[in-house]
C-alpha cells in the first residue's frame, strides 16, 4: 500500500466526515506549487481559498514565522505583545480605520461585527437590533455569522439569530424597503466570494453608505475574502471610495496562519468595553508576526502593485476561454485576483474539479456554476496561463 493510500484509509476512519476532500494528501509547497506525499506536483490557483497570499514557503514569510516561534508564541490578552501592537498600527495606516480587534477566523471576525453593532446601540439606549444582509452572501459557519449567511441550505436545521433579513445583492429598492428606525446595520461583501465571485454593481456600495447614514445604521464590510490585496488595493472598499464603520478580515491576512481581525472607526471604539468580548488566542504574537510578514511582502516585494495587472490578464484569458467554448461558458467576472469563469446552467463546477485535479490544477467552486480562481498573489502570468489552458482542455471535453 502506498503512503498516500495508507493515510487516506486512516483519514476515512478517523477524521470527522463533514468535508468531502479530493483524495490527495499534501506534504509540502513552494510558491504556487503543491506536492503530495508521493511527490506529485500540482499547480495551486486556489491558495487554500484565497488564504495563501504569498504562496507556499515564501522565504520572507517563513523566516519571520520561524523566528517568532523561537521567540514568543502566546501570552494572552492579559498583557500586551509587540507584534500585536505593531500589526494594529499597520492595519490602521493601510485601512484608514482606527482600531483593530484580533481573533482567529473569518466567522469570528463577523461575530465581532455583530456584537459590536448590537452593543453599540444597546449602550446608546436605542432599540436597534435588526441586521440586513444579502442573498448568497457568505459570512461564516458559527451561529451568528451563519444567521447572516445568505444561503438557506447552509442554515437548514440550525435555527439562528432573530432580526436578520436578506435581500437581493445589488437591489437598492429592496434595501430601501427594509430601512426603519430599528435597523442597526447592513453587512456586505464588496465582491460576493463564495456566492459566485459577483462584484457589487457600480455605485452600490456608495448608495449603501448613503442609506446607512440617512437611517442611522452602521455599514459593515465583510472583507474576509476580498481584503489584504486580493482585489489589487489593500481593501475592497478602497476601490469605491466608500468608508465603512467596521470591517472584518481573515483568510489572506495571515498567509495561512489562522488570524482574523475586526477594524473599526474611532467612533465605535467604546462599543465593546472590557469584559464584553474577547478571545484567548486572538492577536497572539505568532499569528500577528505572520500577518505582518504578509503585509511586508505585499508592500515591499512588489506584490500588491502586481495584482491589478495580473488580474486583468487573467480576466482576459478567461474571456478568451468563454468565447472559444460558448456552449459551456457564459462569461467571466471578478476583480483583481478573485475571478470566476461562469458556466452555462446545467454544468456543475463541483463535478468538474476532479478532472482538473487529474490535470494537476487546483481550483475551487463558488456557488454551483462558477469556477473560481483565487491564486496566491505572488502567482506569475505563466502559471495563470498554465492553469487557464488546463481549464480550456477540460471544458473542451464536456
Ligand atoms: C471564508 C469567508 C468567511 C468565513 O471565514 P472562516 O475563516 O472560514 O470562518 C466569512 N466571510 C467571507 C466573505 C468569506 O469568504
Image (cartoon, rainbow, N blue to C red):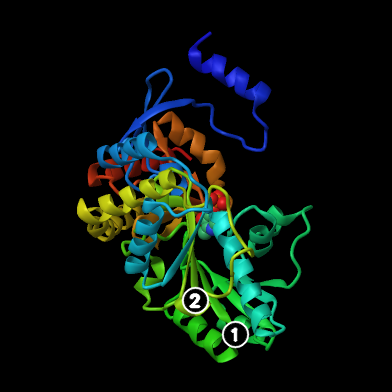
The residue drawn where x is 42% and y is 78% is: 243
- The numbered mark, 2 or 1, whose residue comes first in the sequence reads 1
Residue pushed farthest bottom?
A: 214
Q: Is residue 18 left or right of residue 363?
A: right
Determine the secondary structure under disc 1.
helix
Point out which mark residue 245 bears.
Answer: 2
- Foreground residue among 231 and 281: 281
Residue 279: mark: none
Q: Position of residue 100 (x, y in %)?
A: 45, 64
Tally the numbered discs: 2
The answer, for residue 18, to whether it is visible in the render is: yes
For ligand 1, the image quadrant comes to bottom right
Q: Nearer the viewer, mark 2 or mark 1?
A: 2
Left or right? Give the position of 31 relative to 2. left
Which residue is tagged 1? 173
Left or right of 12? Residue 30 is left
Task: Give yes or no for contact between labels 2 and 1 (Cβ–Cβ under 8 Å).
Answer: no
Where residue 48 appears, as percent x and y from the top left, is 45, 42
Query: Which residue is rendered at x = 31% and y = 61% of the image?
Result: 232
Residue 369 visible somewhere in the drawing: no
Picture coordinates of residue 4, whole percent (x, y): 50, 17
Relative to 170, say whether 194 is above or below: above
Secondary structure at numbered mark 2: loop
Amino acid at each position: 500500500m502506498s503512503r498516500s493510500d495508507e493515510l487516506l484509509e486512516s483519514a476515512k476512519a478517523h477524521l470527522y466526515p463533514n468535508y468531502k476532500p479530493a483524495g490527495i494528501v499534501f506534504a509540502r509547497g513552494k510558491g504556487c506549487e503543491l506536492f503530495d506525499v508521493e511527490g506529485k506536483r500540482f499547480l495551486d490557483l486556489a491558495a487554500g481559498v484565497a488564504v495563501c497570499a504569498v504562496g507556499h514557503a515564501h522565504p520572507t514569510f517563513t523566516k519571520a514565522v520561524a523566528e517568532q516561534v523561537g521567540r514568543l508564541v502566546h501570552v494572552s490578552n492579559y498583557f500586551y505583545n509587540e507584534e500585536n501592537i505593531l500589526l494594529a498600527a499597520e492595519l490602521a495606516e493601510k485601512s484608514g480605520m482606527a482600531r483593530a480587534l484580533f481573533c482567529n477566523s473569518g466567522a469570528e471576525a463577523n461575530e465581532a461585527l455583530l456584537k459590536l453593532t448590537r452593543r453599540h446601540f444597546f449602550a446608546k439606549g436605542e432599540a436597534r437590533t435588526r441586521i440586513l444582509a444579502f442573498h448568497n452572501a457568505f459570512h461564516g459557519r458559527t451561529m451568528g455569522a451563519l444567521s447572516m449567511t445568505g444561503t438557506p441550505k447552509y442554515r437548514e436545521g440550525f435555527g439562528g439569530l432573530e432580526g436578520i433579513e436578506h435581500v437581493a445583492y445589488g437591489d437598492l429598492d429592496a434595501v430601501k424597503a427594509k430601512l426603519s428606525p430599528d435597523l442597526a446595520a447592513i453587512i456586505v461583501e464588496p465582491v460576493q466570494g463564495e456566492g459566485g465571485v459577483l462584484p457589487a454593481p457600480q455605485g452600490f456600495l456608495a448608495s449603501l453608505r448613503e442609506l446607512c447614514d440617512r437611517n442611522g445604521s452602521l455599514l459593515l464590510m465583510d472583507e474576509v475574502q476580498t481584503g489584504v490585496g486580493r482585489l489589487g488595493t489593500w481593501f475592497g472598499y478602497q476601490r469605491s471610495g466608500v468608508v465603512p464603520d467596521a470591517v472584518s478580515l481573515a483568510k489572506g491576512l495571515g498567509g495561512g496562519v489562522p488570524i482574523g481581525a475586526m477594524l473599526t472607526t474611532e467612533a465605535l471604539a467604546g462599543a465593546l468595553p472590557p469584559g464584553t468580548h474577547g478571545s484567548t488566542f486572538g492577536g497572539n504574537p505568532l499569528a500577528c508576526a505572520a500577518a505582518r510578514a504578509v503585509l511586508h511582502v505585499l508592500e515591499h516585494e512588489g506584490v500588491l502593485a502586481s495584482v491589478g495587472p495580473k488580474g486583468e490578464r487573467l480576466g482576459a484569458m478567461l474571456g478568451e476561454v468563454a468565447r472559444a467554448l460558448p456552449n459551456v461558458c457564459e462569461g467571466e467576472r471578478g476583480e483583481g485576483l478573485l475571478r470566476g469563469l461562469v458556466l452555462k446552467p446545467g454544468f456543475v463546477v463541483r463535478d468538474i474539479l476532479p478532472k482538473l485535479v487529474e490535470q494537476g490544477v487546483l481550483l475551487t467552486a463558488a456557488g454551483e456554476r462558477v469556477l473560481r480562481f483565487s491564486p496566491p498573489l505572488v502567482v506569475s502570468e505563466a502559471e495563470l496561463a498554465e492553469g487557464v489552458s488546463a481549464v480550456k482542455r477540460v471544458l473542451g471535453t464536456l
